[in-house]
Amino acid sequence: MVMKTVVSYIGLCAFAALALTACKKVDAPKVTGFTATIAQLEAGTKTHAVKFSLVWDEGDQIKVLDEESASFDFTVSSSEGTTATFVADSPEKVAFLADLEAADYVAFYPNAVVDGEYVKLTIPAEQEYVPGFSFATDTYPMVGFNEGKSFKFLSNAGFLNVSFRAPEGETRQVDKVVLIANEPVAGKLAYSKNGMSYLFYGESNVITLKSTTKLEVTDNSDTDFTFILPEGALFGGFTVEVYDGETLLGQYTTTKVQNLIVAQTFREMPVQVLL
């Protein structure tokens, strides 16, 4: 009898161990990464329709907040154009993502700064020239919301595209285009931590778009310049000045309300001929 009792206890313990092992096997795997789809753009052109697309670059970094406002930065580990993969590269980040499939997280790009009850993104007063309908990385502000392990980003900023030609038979050198608005166009987008609302704190009525090299503007093709602006900007009109160093090559003013900037949309102006 004693022997049987011992065997029974041993058998019971073995069964409990097997049950625990079985429980471990059916536990949901830890979330070690996620994907994010970048905001897509529409043409707001006055001259012709153009198809635009934004893509992620390797090295792009986003700041992710959970429902308790804890935050971590995540960097693109791989990108397939409009969709990127982000990987948790530390135990702390894996723990942070534990509720990703069940809870609401929010992400901000680029260079997001948590300041009290807000997360701040910047529309800079000095922007870097990139050819065509494009712009420098780490400059277009976006906010993203998760659906499980996938974030979808959108933006409250849009674009103004201006383009120039040289006079017939001539060329011009351009290294700076200045946008002068009748209201603030550069400053901070201060988002609530859940990303559902924001305030724009204007810091400058002027945005300068600079090229690191002299751009040759000819008489037979357009040279485009793209400004990043907050939605709703330019309702009071604006002036654009084109420079070669300190030499003014052209100044163009419009007061039309139709030039209002719409989020995730390019506002394309008619081509202007330089002096």
Image (cartoon, rainbow, N blue to C red):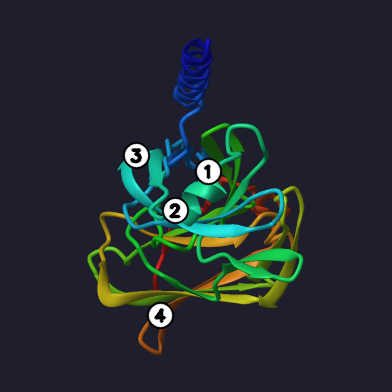
Residue on which the image places disc 4 = 243
- Which label sits in the foreground, 1 or 2? 2
Marks 3 and 2 in Cβ contact (< 8 Å): no
What amino acid is found at the position of numbered circle 4 in the picture?
Tyr
Mark 4 / mark 3, whichever is N-terminal: 3
Residue at the (74%, 48%) spot, across then down? 196
Q: CA distance from mark 3 to mark 2?
A: 28 Å
Q: CA distance from mark 2 to mark 4?
A: 52 Å
Query: Which residue was labeled with disc 1?
Result: 45
Q: Could you say whether the residue bearing mark 3 is in a helix, strand or loop?
A: loop
Q: Residue at x 51, y 27 (%)?
A: 28
For residue 46, above or below residue 201 = above
Residue on which disc 2 sits: 91
The residue under the point 50% across, 61% down is 110
Residue 137 placement: quadrant: bottom left
Q: Is residue 193 left or right of residue 152?
A: right
